Image (cartoon, coloured by chain):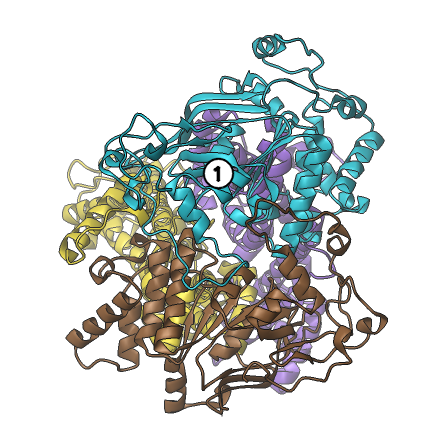
């Protein structure tokens, strides 16, 4: 599946522009060159020549495709159009750690909080009343796109309360120095708002999923048996109900990763966060086709890899799935 | 002697596509048997879960095709039938399924099934005629039409639903009815009524019945012949009287001994554990029962026993009887 | 388990609300059943009702019976007759919208009904254990078998070394005819019969006085069914626990039980020894039930069932609940609810035919 | 529970009309017990009312883009506002101008009346959702039945495509398609075209969920029964399966509309929308582009957010409620 997904995404990237009948890349390059936007006109000419040479645009399509595939495997996406001669790979390399840091932290946080909250909400013995007040608003937030929540948060926390910075990965006046504690704190402060908008908007989703899973689980015979065995509530909650309900929840995590990423792209755009989302946005506005292709490819690769990790972890959670049969 | 419905050396293998050789299941393994056209009988196909009895029923019904061997109806290969022959087969061989609720589409009223059957097989010219046929069929199985028509399936009891299925089968004037565990999901007190209505079809209307079941007691009560299956193979077949009263195959014996009898005196004897505590192991090349058999011999582990003729109307596939002559094919259809 | 064996101990215990619990495997092993003079379980006028939109559903209505120490009682009846509801109520596992509306469940003299959640939790497994209907799914799929048995012990205050705990589990597994290594396995690695035997091992892990076995073999093939029933039989003999077997298969319960109780529409209509019930059934329903069971004795010309269907529990007929289906029905049956009649030999029947105070023309017909 | 409908008293069967009536009132009774559906309808109703109000109060030309108009004509156009002095920051001037000309919600940086923008944008956005959602649901359902019912290679292929495409964030695919599309269209794209682009992926979700339902339903005996009664594939699908799956498909349609709107707003917010339209997504885009948040133009950015939030929550409640209605027992997760 991993290979299939990456392969399909890569091929898609290659063929789609070509199915439009013309070569949008070349057209766009010439257009931009004529307008003289951002970069010097001679750079565009050099760029076009580079790509012509690289993919042999006069050669048969199959050959071009193979060349393209081999460069994709080597993570060589060529050079950016708007930022020529910066390589696409370089742009992505700079942005990737920001995105991954933000996404992994906020997704895991939302997953854990939401899952636990949903579990408690469905459990008829726990401190239900408190959760009944807290969680339902999150269910509604789950229906709202991340970036809208981001806008509201910016206005509330950054614009009105001035508690947190408006956007960016760090203050424009500071120089990035990863060994400096002050800088790290700044990075943390800047990531809080985008992270918060992702977390707040997805807690409800996980909570809802977990709640319905828990309700299903409580109808299972082993839950009745746990009660008949005279187990304490805590034990049957964690070791029997939650332990089993979390399994489909983990599968859901793998399934929804693409959606998490889609939503995060716009969050980064809104917060001017220096991640791949912003790179992608800038590429879209600048019609920087190679950057778009590179970003799409890398995101798909990252998601496929994350799913692979979940696949590997899953047998550890569920003894019924063994590596041999997976 | 003509055979109405006949299985010849039928094997059905599930799973194991082009890329998947690991989970291949042999659900039915080289089974041969037949229902005579001359005399309407009730034949039991008995076995535990995993014995392949339901697969056998589905093969007979023509909804799945055998991997090897052939299923013939009136001398014609079922899987190769087409057009009017196939229609004819569909009408003359009628199923009754296990779950009397699942066969009803919850969207429609319960009699939808009967209407569809009449319509599709073109049994009635007019609406009045159709209703008349339905009423007649319902009355035959002891249901009051006025109570049944126009109701939704969930408004009927399990017994009513199952008897309505019998009525549906009856409506089509079939020659064979395949009843797959028709009473296993019905309460004991209603079981007898349903079985009795099936028996009536056989006795009064001359319809042959294949009764697929795990319950040897009911099989004994209503059937003439029996086929005992174990892991896809027929281990013993013959008249129900002989097979159940005096089982020859060690598996049949074990099965019959395990039937809880409603008697106050004798409990099950102790000491069954040796036979029973052996967990089922994997594949064997020989007799499939070898790993559980109390009378196992060396050759049982390596060779697959053929059917031996024990009495004139009974065969068993077990080397305990290898001095007896090998049985001819399809002994049930005498 | 009960260290205190003086006569008025039950009341004291009832007041303290708690039994003295063993804390180590060794204490647990020595505890045993004891020789209490009281019945293992004594149910008086138990009512389990459900609130539904159509009204109150009387799933179990005024059921009384007594089970002596080490006795095996079977409860039989058609589906929906309340036998499983009764079993759950004995464990106090009745779930909303159901509730216990009244009555007593005296377990070795102590009434379970007024116990609070924590007291009842401690009583489960240690005093009264449940082997469920579909043990196939009664095991937590992601835990090893031994861990699932440990859980019950630990939550009942057993504090012992891992080795002692494990040895105890091995003993339990051997007792139900399973190998020790089953303890290290996961449920999906076991066959249905093995799982059911694990359920029996778990249920007896703290030597309870009463085991409620709710259709323990309903999902199993006949051969395995016999194996499991024999296992239960042997464990019962070893531990001396009293067993309430809930079932629908007359043949099966006849093979296992000492006494049979027949339930119909939430009521216990007939109770007696296996011999009494099978050979001389008294209640018309019991008679029809026995007659509808096919056997291997002789081929019958006609199979007879019981005509009609059980009444809806929300809308029970006035008088006798069985009257609408009863072949010996008379006018009085449709008006007067029959009493529980003690007809000697510890037999009870709920039918006007046996009530001296009610005038029935057809008396003695049965 | 113990008292199922099987024991209901039997009513006269002919009373069909009252039965239908009962079912209808049953639906209403059900709605009352399912607050999600009510809440969903109420929220969507609020949007409709808001749109109707906007349409009554404004003229379509109020929503015209005047971004390239000379700056001094930018704010309230008809009457130069007194605030237009050198001391005042220009931005404040297009804020509230409701004395002379009724700009109830003010105007935006492009000179559009915000309320007028909504009266155009809401139907445009809803149109995108409906076009993409219904195309997705129809195509998805067809594919799901083809895959689920007929199985085989077709199923394998459809499943592979769906699984693969669902792994890739939809918005990325849409971005690439949209860019390519705009190139073909010479940089222009209408919102209808955007809807069609979104429809290209909108079938994935319905295909997956409906297929799994078809697979489950295919196992139900009544489907087999219908086939054995002589119904062919399309007949079984249309007459036996569709009626039962319809509530489920409708519930999924709401979900599909909701995700299509979500995708459209996402694309538009990224600058890939129809610049000549006033869709909710384009409003968000312009707000982001002009930094209305940091400039304090709350009257501009808050209404679209509020409308979008109400719209999504309304659709969410509706789909949840319908889900429960379509599938009371299964309690699907997503």
Locate the C terminus of chain C and report the quarter of the image it occupies: top left
Image point (33%, 58%), residue name: B160
Query: In the visual, does C133 lie left or right of D200?
Result: right
Q: The chain drawn yellow is chain what?
A: D
Q: Residues within 10 Å of mark 1 (few under 14, many from 20)?
A: many
The quarter of the displayed image where residue D184 is located: bottom left
Chain letter for purple?
A: A
C231 to B100, vertically: above or below: above
Q: Which quadrant of the view contains residue C16?
A: top right
Colour in which chain C is drawn: cyan
Q: Numbered disc 1: what chain?
A: C
**Chain painted in brown in the figure:** B
Residue C26 locus on image (x, y percent) = 81, 24
Asked if residue C96 lies left or right of residue B276, the reply is left
Please give the name of the residue rendered at 73% of the width and 37% of the height, measured from the top-left corner.
Answer: C147
On screen, residue D105 versus residue D171, left or right, reads: left
Q: Residue B221, percent across and down?
A: 49, 64
Of C37 and D316, the residue lying toward us: C37
Give the quadrant of the N terminus of chain C.
Answer: top right
Q: Quadrant of residue D255?
A: bottom left
Q: Which is more toward the observer, A325 or D86? A: A325
Q: Which residue is mark 1?
A: C84
């Amino acid at each position: 599946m991993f290979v299939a997904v990456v392969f399909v995404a890569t091929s898609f990237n290659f063929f789609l522009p070509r199915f439009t009948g013309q070569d949008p890349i070349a057209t766009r390059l010439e257009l931009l060159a004529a307008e003289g936007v951002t970069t010097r006109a001679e750079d565009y000419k050099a760029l076009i020549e580079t790509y012509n040479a690289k993919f042999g645009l006069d050669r048969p399509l199959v050959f071009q495709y193979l060349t393209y595939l081999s460069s994709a495997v080597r993570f060589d996406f060529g050079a950016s159009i708007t930022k020529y001669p910066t390589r696409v790979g370089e742009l992505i390399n700079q942005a990737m750690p920001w995105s991954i840091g933000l996404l992994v932290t906020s997704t895991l946080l939302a997953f854990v909080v939401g899952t636990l909250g949903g579990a408690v909400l469905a459990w008829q013995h726990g401190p239900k009343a408190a959760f009944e007040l807290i969680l339902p608003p999150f269910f509604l937030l789950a229906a709202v796109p991340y970036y809208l929540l981001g806008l509201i948060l910016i206005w509330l926390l950054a614009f009105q309360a001035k508690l947190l910075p408006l956007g960016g990965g760090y203050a424009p006046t500071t120089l990035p120095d990863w060994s400096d504690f002050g800088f790290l704190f700044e990075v943390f402060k800047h990531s809080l708002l985008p992270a918060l908008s992702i977390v707040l908007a997805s807690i409800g989703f996980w909570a809802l999923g977990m709640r319905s899973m828990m309700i299903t689980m409580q109808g299972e015979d082993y839950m009745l048996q746990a009660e008949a065995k005279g187990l304490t509530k805590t034990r049957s909650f964690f070791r029997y109900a939650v332990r089993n309900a979390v399994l489909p929840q983990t599968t859901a995590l793998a399934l929804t990763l693409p959606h998490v990423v889609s939503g995060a792209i716009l969050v980064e755009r809104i917060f001017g966060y220096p991640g791949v989302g912003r790179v992608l946005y800038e590429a879209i506005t600048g019609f920087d086709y190679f950057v778009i292709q590179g970003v799409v490819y890398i995101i798909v690769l990252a998601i496929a890899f994350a799913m692979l990790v979940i696949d590997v972890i899953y047998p550890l959670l569920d003894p019924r799935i063994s590596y041999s049969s997976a | 002697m003509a055979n109405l419905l006949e299985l010849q050396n039928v094997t059905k293998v599930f799973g194991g596509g082009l890329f998947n050789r690991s989970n291949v299941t042999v659900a039915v393994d080289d089974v041969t048997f037949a229902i005579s056209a001359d005399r309407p009988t009730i034949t039991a196909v008995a076995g535990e879960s995993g014995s392949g009895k339901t697969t056998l029923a589905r093969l007979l019904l023509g909804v799945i095709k055998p991997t090897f061997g052939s299923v013939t109806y009136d001398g014609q290969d079922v899987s190769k039938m087409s057009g009017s022959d196939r229609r004819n087969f569909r009408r003359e061989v009628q199923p009754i399924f296990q779950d009397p609720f699942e066969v009803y589409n919850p969207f429609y009223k319960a009699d939808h099934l009967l209407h569809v059957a009449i319509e599709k097989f073109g049994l009635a010219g007019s609406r009045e005629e159709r209703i008349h046929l339905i009423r007649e069929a319902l009355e035959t199985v002891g249901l009051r039409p006025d109570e049944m028509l126009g109701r939704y399936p969930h408004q009927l009891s399990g017994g009513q639903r199952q008897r309505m299925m019998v009525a549906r089968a009856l409506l089509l004037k079939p020659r064979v009815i395949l009843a797959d565990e028709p009473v296993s999901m019905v309460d004991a007190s209603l079981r007898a009524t349903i079985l009795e209505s099936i028996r009536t079809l056989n006795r009064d209307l001359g319809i042959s019945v294949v009764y697929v079941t795990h319950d040897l007691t009911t099989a004994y009560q209503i059937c003439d012949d029996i086929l005992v299956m174990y892991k896809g193979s027929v281990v013993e077949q013959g008249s129900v009287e002989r097979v159940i009263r005096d089982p020859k195959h060690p598996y049949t014996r074990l099965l019959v001994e395990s039937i809880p009898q409603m008697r106050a005196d004798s409990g099950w004897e102790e000491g069954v554990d040796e036979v029973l505590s052996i967990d089922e192991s994997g594949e064997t090349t020989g007799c499939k029962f070898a790993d559980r058999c109390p009378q196992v011999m060396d050759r049982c582990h390596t060779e697959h026993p053929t059917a031996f003729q024990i009495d004139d109307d009974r065969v068993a596939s077990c080397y305990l009887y290898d001095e007896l002559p090998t049985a001819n094919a399809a002994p049930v259809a005498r | 388990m009960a260290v205190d064996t003086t006569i008025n101990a039950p009341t004291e215990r009832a007041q303290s609300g708690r039994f003295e619990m063993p804390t180590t495997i060794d204490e647990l092993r020595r505890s045993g059943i004891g020789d209490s003079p009281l019945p293992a379980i004594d149910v008086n006028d138990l009512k389990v009702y459900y609130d539904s939109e159509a009204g109150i559903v009387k799933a179990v209505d005024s059921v009384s019976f007594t089970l002596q120490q080490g006795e095996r009682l079977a409860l039989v009846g058609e589906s929906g007759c309340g036998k499983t509801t009764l079993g759950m109520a004995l464990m106090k596992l009745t779930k909303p919208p159901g509730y216990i509306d009244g009555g007593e469940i005296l377990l070795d003299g102590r009434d379970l009904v007024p116990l609070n959640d924590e007291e009842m939790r401690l009583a489960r497994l240690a005093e009264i254990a449940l082997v469920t209907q579909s043990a196939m799914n009664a095991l937590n799929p992601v835990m090893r078998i031994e861990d699932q048995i440990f859980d019950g012990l630990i939550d009942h205050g057993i504090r012992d070394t891992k080795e002692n705990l494990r040895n105890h589990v091995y003993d339990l597994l051997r007792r139900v005819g399973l190998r020790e290594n089953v303890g290290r396995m996961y449920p999906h690695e076991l066959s249905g019969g093995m799982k059911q035997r694990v359920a029996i091992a778990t249920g007896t892990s703290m030597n309870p006085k009463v085991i409620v076995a709710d259709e323990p073999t309903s999902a199993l093939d006949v051969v395995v069914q016999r194996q499991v029933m024999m296992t239960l039989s042997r464990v019962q003999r070893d531990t001396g626990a009293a067993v309430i077997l809930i079932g629908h298969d007359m043949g099966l319960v006849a093979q296992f039980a000492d006494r049979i109780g027949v339930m119909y529409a939430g009521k216990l209509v007939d109770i007696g020894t296996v011999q009494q019930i099978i050979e001389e059934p008294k209640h018309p329903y019991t008679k029809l039930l026995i007659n509808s069971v096919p056997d291997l004795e002789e081929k019958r010309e006609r199979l007879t069932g019981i005509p009609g269907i059980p009444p809806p529990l929300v809308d029970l007929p006035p008088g006798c609940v069985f009257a609408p289906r009863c072949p010996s029905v008379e006018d009085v049956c449709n008006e007067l609810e029959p009493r529980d009649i003690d007809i000697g030999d510890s037999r009870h029947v709920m039918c006007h035919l046996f009530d001296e105070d009610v005038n029935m023309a057809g008396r003695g017909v049965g | 529970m113990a008292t199922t409908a099987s024991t209901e008293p039997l009513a006269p069967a002919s009373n069909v009309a009252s039965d239908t009536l009962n079912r209808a009132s049953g639906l209403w009774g059900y709605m009352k017990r399912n607050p999600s559906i009510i809440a969903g309808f109420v929220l969507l109703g609020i949007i409709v009312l808001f749109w109707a109000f906007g349409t009554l109060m404004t003229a379509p030309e109020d929503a015209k883009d005047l971004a390239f108009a000379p700056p001094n004509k930018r704010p309230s156009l008809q009457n130069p506002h007194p605030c237009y002095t050198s001391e005042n920051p220009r931005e404040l001037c297009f804020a509230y101008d409701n004395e002379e000309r009724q700009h109830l919600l003010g105007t935006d940086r492009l000179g559009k009346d915000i309320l007028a923008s909504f009266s155009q944008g809401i139907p445009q956005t809803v149109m995108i959702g409906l076009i993409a959602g219904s195309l997705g649901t129809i195509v998805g359902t067809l594919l799901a039945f083809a895959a689920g019912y007929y199985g085989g290679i077709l199923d394998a292929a459809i499943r592979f495509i769906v699984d693969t495409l669902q792994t890739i964030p939809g918005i990325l695919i849409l971005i690439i398609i949209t860019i390519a599309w705009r190139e073909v269209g010479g940089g222009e794209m209408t919102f209808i075209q955007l809807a069609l682009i979104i429809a290209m992926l909108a079938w994935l979700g319905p295909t997956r969920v409906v297929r799994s339902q078809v697979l489950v339903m295919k196992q139900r005996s009544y489907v087999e029964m219908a086939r054995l009664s002589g119904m062919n594939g399309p007949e079984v699908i249309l007459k036996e399966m569709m009626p039962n799956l319809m509530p489920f498909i409708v519930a999924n349609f709401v979900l599909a509309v909701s995700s299509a709107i979500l995708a459209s707003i996402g694309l538009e917010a990224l600058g890939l929308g129809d610049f000549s339209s006033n869709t909710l997504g384009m409003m968000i885009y312009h707000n982001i582009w002009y930094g209305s948040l940091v400039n304090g133009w709350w009257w501009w950015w808050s209404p679209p957010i509020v409308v979008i939030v109400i719209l999504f929550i309304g659709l969410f409640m509706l789909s949840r409620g319908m889900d429960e209605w379509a599938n009371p027992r299964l309690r699907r997760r997503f």
